[in-house]
Amino acid sequence: MSNEKRKRRLGDRNDGYRVKESDPIHSFMPFMLPNRCDNEAVMSELIDLTKINEYVAKKNAENPKFKYTMFHFLCAAIAKCIYQRPKLNYFYKHKRLYERKFLSEAFIVKRQLVDSSPETLAILKFDTDSEISPIEQVHSKVEKIVFEVRHENKDDGATDIMGVLKKLPKFILDIFMGFINFLDNRGILFKDFVSIDPYHQTVFLSNTGSIKLTAQYHHLANFGTNSFFVLIGQKHQHPYYSNDGSVEMKEAVELGLTIDERIADGTYFANSLKIIRKLAENPELIELPFSTIIETE
């Protein structure tokens, strides 16, 4: 059942349901380390692209108007992983733990890959109750966003708001942000603001490989509720060793993951990555709807 259909209870937020911590360590951590940036756990995962490349090539052999890419697949795989591992969609705010009511991804789109080109924010909100697969949801949503940004020169709502606010005096901006944080800490921040702000989404992604940049770490932010940041690195040839000592070079990409360690423990994170590995090895599974469980054992 979708989180958005659950009945609201005392202590819930507009964007999340209150979670009662079950163990003393996680109950105490937000008081000892209240800032998200003080609790960053950094992980990396090397993805063999052999099967993914074959899958993408097969999809594009059908000559879609908008080509499928590795980025689409990884966005879908990360969304599927988070859906199946719900603690990855938890967040702390005002020293309380919440389960987000929706599953979403945010990333930045440049109109052109040049220094002077402006950036705009893109947000994908998934319908996890739908029979439409994660990959098809990503593909259709990204196609719409790219067309609006690169052909219609349309800006996202957050960029439009910041364009207006930047003209205000500094003290007015300080008051405005103080008001936003006041509402956010109490869980009553406007839904329209939450829907367009990347720091209030499940996961923030950065496709650094698209600009030929290798990076393994990106910080979280104390503002907002985003507990999870993923960097998608540059494709490269990587040596894979077999049991007999032979070596095979395969195309691979590294994921750099930064996550608020308070939302779960290391075992939970490690078991979650198994889902992404399973999908990379069996890409056709991403065609199944969100509700279909991916077995990893």
Image (spheres, rainbow, N blue to C red):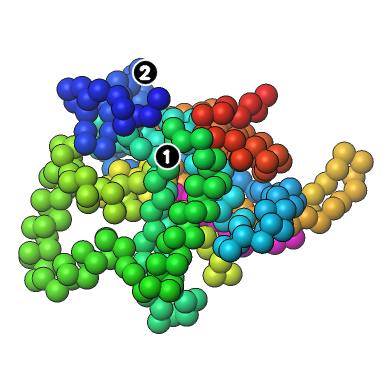
Q: Quadrant of the N terminus?
A: top left
| Residue carrying label 1 | 127
Q: Amino acid at mark 1?
A: Asp
Q: Quadrant of the C terminus?
A: top right
| Residue carrying label 2 | 23
Q: Nearer the viewer, residue 96 or 73?
A: 73
Lateral position of residue 193 relative to residue 207, left or right? left
Choose mark 2 or mark 1, whichever is in front. 1
| Residue 10 rendering spot, x and y as whole percentages | 17, 22
| Residue 14 rendering spot, x and y as whole percentages | 21, 36
Q: Which residues are magenta?
A: 228-237
| Residue 181 rendering spot, x and y as whole percentages | 16, 48
| Residue 229 rendering spot, x and y as whole percentages | 44, 49
Residue 186 appears in the picture as rendered: yes
Rendered view: 172 above or below 246: below
Q: CA distance from mark 2 to mark 1?
A: 32 Å
Q: Residues within 10 Å of mark 2 (few under 14, many from 20)?
A: few
The residue shown at (35%, 38%) is 102
The residue shown at (72%, 53%) is 58
Displayed quadrant of residue 153: bottom left
Examine the residues drawn in magenta and state their main secondary structure.
strand
